[in-house]
Image (cartoon, rainbow, N blue to C red):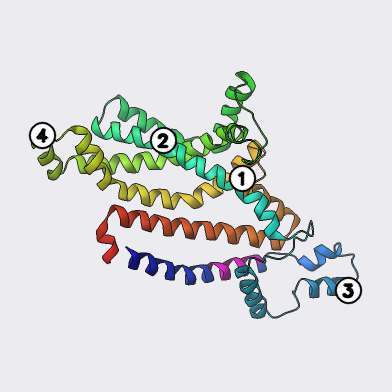
């Protein structure tokens, strides 16, 4: 397992370099001129534009700018925001915990929804539980996230007045209020993520329950809990774990909409602000962090899959 982990860690370096190159090139190809925008628009004097171009490093060759970008990013220096003159790393330190909290709770709710539904549905195909799991999967895919979020706000915030509708409270300030303010956004995200996870786990577990080794264990007198929970479910978790890993970028993209509906100060809302204000430094920092999060999630998914299936470690 240690050799497998080291081998996977070594593959992260070229992945991050390629990701940094893509982020740098795409943000550099955005229309407009950041120096002109910083100087005040087309009416700015050429001297002022040249001053900002030198200050932002836009007068350097593209290759040199990319090398500077990678070196500074590796040390945690992501530049200064054009809009607020604040270090981008400080902005991310404020925004990232909000999005990470939402993503983490969303995945927890997705697992809590998908695991029992898929297990019961696989044990009783074409039964009531199977129909419920199909309904959950279909609704999670068919209902837009913003519409489902609005329905939750109307019911639990405006009608029943059980939960807050907007804003965010840091965990360090009040853990209970942190959870209550993130509950509706996390349910919205978890509902969307549970759809594909329920379908994948139900199909995988149903396939394993029909295999010979399961029939052999049942005929040998093993309890249903042992057969399903200890053997069949563990064997069926591989595709489900892969599905969870693939849903990390989907979850981050969904957070952009959810944060807008619930007025959460996360990286999704920050990315939108950076696009409209042409704050290239902030945009690069947010996208680079998002890529890093996806790469780390992929690495953790590989480790989890290797723990479930030992054959993967020797490949």
Q: Nearer the viewer, mark 3 or mark 1?
A: 1
Among the two numbered marks 3 and 1 on one chain, the one whose residue lies closer to the N terminus: 3
* CB within 8 Å, label 2 to label 3: no
- Contact between marks 3 and 1 (CB within 8 A): the answer is no
Seen from the viewer's position, the closer of residues 110 and 22 is 110
Q: Considering the image in quadrants, where does the C terminus appear?
A: bottom left
The residue pinned by badge 4 equals 221
In which image quadrant can residue 263 be found?
Answer: top right
Disc 2 to disc 1, how far (Cα)? Answer: 21 Å
Residue 112 is tagged as: 2
- What segment is highlighted magenta in the picture? 19-27
Name the mark nearer the viewer: 1 or 4. 4
Q: Residues within 10 Å of mark 3 (few under 14, many from 20)?
A: few
Residue at 25 percent of width and 47 percent of height: 235
Estimate the x, y position of residue 32 in percent, counting from the top left. 74, 65
- State the separation of the CA atoms marked 3 and 1: 41 Å
Element under disc 2: helix
At a point 79% along the width and 56% down the height, the residue shown is 84
Q: Nearer the viewer, residue 288 or 77?
A: 77
């Amino acid at each position: 397992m240690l050799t497998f982990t080291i081998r996977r860690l070594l593959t992260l370096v070229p992945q991050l370099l390629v990701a940094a190159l893509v982020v740098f090139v795409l943000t550099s190809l955005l229309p407009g001129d950041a120096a002109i925008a910083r100087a005040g628009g087309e009416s700015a004097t050429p001297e002022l534009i040249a001053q900002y171009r030198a200050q932002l490093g836009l007068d350097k060759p593209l290759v040199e700018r990319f090398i500077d970008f990678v070196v500074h990013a590796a040390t945690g220096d992501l530049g200064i925001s054009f809009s607020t003159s604040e270090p981008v790393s400080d902005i991310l330190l404020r925004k990232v915990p909000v999005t990470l909290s939402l993503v983490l709770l969303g995945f927890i709710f997705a697992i809590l929804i998908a695991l029992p539904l898929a297990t019961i549905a696989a044990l009783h195909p074409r039964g009531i539980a199977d129909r419920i799991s199909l309904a959950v999967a279909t609704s999670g895919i068919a209902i837009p996230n913003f519409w489902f979020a609005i329905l939750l706000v109307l019911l639990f915030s405006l009608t029943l007045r059980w939960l807050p509708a907007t804003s965010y409270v840091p965990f360090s300030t009040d853990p209970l209020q942190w959870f209550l303010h993130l509950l509706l956004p996390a349910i919205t995200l978890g509902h969307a993520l549970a759809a594909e996870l329920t379908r994948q786990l139900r199909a995988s577990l149903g396939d394993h329950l029909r295999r010979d080794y399961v029939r052999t264990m049942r005929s040998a007198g093993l309890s249903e809990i042992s057969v399903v929970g200890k053997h069949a479910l563990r064997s069926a978790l591989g595709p489900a774990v892969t599905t969870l890993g693939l849903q990390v970028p989907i979850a981050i993209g969904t957070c952009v909409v959810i944060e807008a509906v619930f007025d959460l100060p996360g990286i999704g809302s920050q990315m939108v602000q950076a696009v409209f204000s042409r704050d290239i430094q902030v945009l690069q920092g947010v996208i680079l962090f998002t890529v890093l999060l996806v790469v780390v999630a992929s690495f953790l998914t590989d480790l989890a899959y290797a723990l479930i299936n030992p054959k993967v470690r020797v490949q």
